[in-house]
Amino acid sequence: NTAAGSYSTVGGGNGNSAAYTSSTIAGGFGNFANGDRGAVGGGYDNSVGYSSTVSGGEENSAGVYGTVGGGRDNFALYFGTVAGGDDNSATSYSAAVGGGHNNAASGYVAFVGGGESNIASAYAATVGGGYLNNAVSGSAWVGGGNNNVASGYASAVSGGSA
């Protein structure tokens, strides 16, 4: 373990590195704090950037101001949040993914609740869940189902199948 940054802390574990000012790793294995004030709670092979947090899990990353709660191979930045699941990303300002698999919230304040392979890619776009659903216009909404697309401004698809 290495605590190389000023005021940095590594609580325990193995192979952890808190390399920047005021960065913290509580424990786990192979975790990296690669930005000032980044924090990793534990888990395996997680990494954080500037003022970001990964609570635990495996192979999660949080970039600038991002938060990942846990799960595996999730990514968040710019005040984005991924609560858990697998292979999810929240990559725009205040975007969020609740969980599931391979979901992406890439629009400003966009949201995907869960499911699999869903995308919310525009301002305030929302996909509640389901499979292969897309909300691709501002304030568009897909509740669930599969292969549904809400592509008009403030349009909505409650569910079903395309």
Image: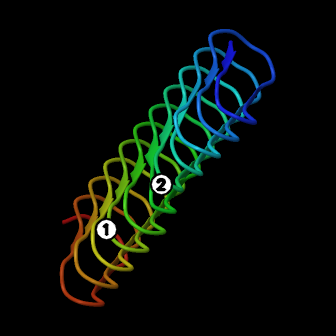
Left or right relative to 160: residue 96: right
- Residue at the far bottom in the pictured view: 154
Disc nearest the viewer among 1 and 2: 2
Q: For residue 114, which numbered disc appears in the image?
A: 2
Q: Is residue 159 above or below residue 79?
A: below
Residue placed at 23% from the left, 80% from the top? Answer: 137
**At label 2, which amino acid type do we have?**
Gly
Query: In the figure, 70 relative to 147: above or below?
Result: above
Identity of the residue drawn at 50% across and 34% down: 60
Q: Is disc 2 placed on a helix, strand or loop?
A: loop
Tell me the number on the disc at residue 7. Answer: none
Residue visible at 31% across and 48% down in the picture: 117
Q: Position of residue 64 (x, y in %)?
A: 48, 53
Q: Quadrant of residue 8?
A: top right
Residue 63 is situated, as x and y percent measured from the top left of the image, at: 46, 47
> Where 118 sits versus 138, above or below?
above
Extreme residue in the top direction: 14
Dot 2 alpha-carbon crowd within 10 angstroms: few under 14, some 14 to 19, many 20 or more: many
Label at residue 160: 1
How far, Cα to Cα, is label 1 from label 2? 16 Å
Classify mark 1: residues with Cα within 10 Å, few (<14), some (14-19) or many (20+): few
Look at the picture and state if 62 lies above or below 80. above
Along the line of sight, which residue is nearer the eye, 122 or 154? 122
Q: Nearer the viewer, residue 152 or 110?
A: 110
**Residue 71 image point, x, y percent:** 56, 35
22 left or right of 90 in image: right
Most foreground residue, 117 or 10: 10
Residue at (53, 21) in percent of width and height = 45
User: In which quadrant is the N terminus drawn?
Assistant: top right
